[in-house]
Image (cartoon, coloured by chain):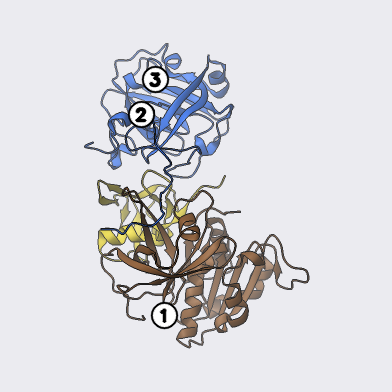
Amino acid sequence: MARTALPGRLTWQVTRVVEVTRETSSAKTILLDAPEWAGHRAGQHVDVRLTAEDGYQAQRSYSIASAPEDDHLALTVEEIDDGEVSPYLTEELRAGDDLELRGPIGGWFVWEGTEVGPLLLFAGGSGVVPLRAMLRHRAATSNRTPARLVYSARSLDDVIYRDELERVAHGAEIRLALTRSWPEGWTGHRGRVDDALLDDVTWPPSEAPAIYICGPTGFVEAISREMVARGHDPGRVRTERFGPTTG
Amino acid sequence: MEDFVVDGNALAGALQQRMGRDVTGERGTCGHCGRASVIAELAVYPKAPSPVARCPHCGDVVMVVTEIRGTVTVNLDQFAM
Amino acid sequence: MSPISRGFHGRRRGTVDPSRVPPGQYLTTDFPVLSAGPTPRTDLDEWSFTIDGAVDSSRSWSWSQLAALPAEEITKDIHCVTKWSKLDTQWRGVSVDVLFEDVTTRAGYVTAWSDGGYTTNLPIADVRDGKAWVAYEYDGRPLSPEHGGPARLLVPHLYFWKSAKWVRGLTLTVMDEPGFWEGYGYNNYGDPWREQRYQGD
């Protein structure tokens, strides 16, 4: 599976759903068999296209959740209220169905592990998806770069890949920030990512961390501004904005 | 109600279709204010008849991607690459 | 050929009445927000509406002056070029005919222009004789910013991109001057009943 992703024009390819598993009350991970898949880099995404019987089509982009080394191509989809495509993918799609997609797409919001400097990841909600691909890639290549993921979610129930992050962590330090509710005795961060948490997790500019921020636009812009304000080279900060805060 | 704005990563597929390569990491200069940005950092308004990309510095329109009768057109008049 | 996505229907539901819903459109019960840029926020005490350009003398109204003009309740179907239609939408606003009462012009066209830089062009006949309003209420409440408030142009017989949000004026022109979407390949006129979405339709 870990062949080099060839650049050039994208073509639509038909994949087959192997399994759909629930991550949270609103998110599911879809494992795919993709015989024409040429490989990808962690952080890239795909465009998914659905076609109704009368020919009507709808298309959306989803970050790739799997590492290039994983057995199956995986997408994690969060259901958007009133969405047109995400409710179909999270509620209707099942093993054996066809799913048309093109990709991999995007060459800027990627991490390959060949860069120097520690890896600092900030995830807001479903922004964790491409960052999880990066951590899996790091683990699969036995990359020893120090890595830290700061993951902001409403509650523990909203944490995608919770088991994976809690138990395996792929050798990275995981810091959860729960913004709305937390269990009794919670020793992790309570509330939004703030200065105190940033002071604790952010390597100094002298160590030139590679910084990736993904999630709702407001979250990404706030963290990005903070990183630059703390003296990090804007060229070392890469961002991917998913749209307005969903709540 | 927050504006629905994303970034140039959202245009990556359409741009790759049209230009034959990934351009999200490529820089361009805004035709209005003269400042440079990476395409991934453009402010993209996807909830429009066609997606509109604006310069993250001055806010003026630098790119519009239309799909008309199956043909994808990237209007890049105000973004010098 | 794309495979059919088993069980996928998209947003469209049921059959539509072709006498109410133009070709290629589907009905929606919500009110999608589409925008080419950030939502402008203009203070009402800085707001004005102006008619200028190819006129004998330009006219301008402050917010309170506009609010004092005779207004109408308007119930119309609206049609977006992105294929959704919404029936029996309710507005309140001032007819453009009222705004044109003292305006003398031989211009054949108008360009509607808005806060944020948006423009759209129309033949002058398409904003007269009861076809257009400057609307400031929707569904009995002040028009919200994301839907074009404090005031938008309302021209329901054409695709809704002609109903410029955040409208601040109409500039009368002798030559037809394509506006924002018209310049990017959208139809110059935009009649939903002839499905004039793009240039060449």
Residue where numbered disc 3 is placed:
C131
State the SS at label 2: loop
Answer whether labels 1 and 3 touch (C-beta < 8 Å).
Answer: no
Cα distance in 3D space between marks 2 and 1? 52 Å
Q: Is residue C32 above or below residue C134?
A: below
Residue A23: percent from left, percent from top: 56, 68
Chain B colour in the picture = yellow
Residue at the image position 28 percent from the left and 71 percent from the top: A7
Q: Is residue A126 left or right of residue C187?
A: right
State the SS at label 1: loop
Residue B53: percent from left, percent from top: 39, 51
Q: Residue furthest left?
A: C200
Residue where numbered disc 2 is placed:
C158
Identify the chain of the residue marked 2, using the numbered disc in the image: C
Q: Is residue C160 above or below residue A57?
A: above
Choose between C115 and C83: the one closer to the eye.
C83
Q: Is residue C15 above or below residue A247?
A: above
Q: Which mark is residue A71?
A: 1
Q: Earlier in the sequence, mark 2 or mark 3?
A: 3
Answer whether labels 2 and 3 touch (C-beta < 8 Å).
Answer: no
Residue A19: percent from left, percent from top: 46, 71
Cα distance in 3D space between marks 2 and 3? 10 Å
Q: Are marks 2 and 3 on the same chain?
A: yes
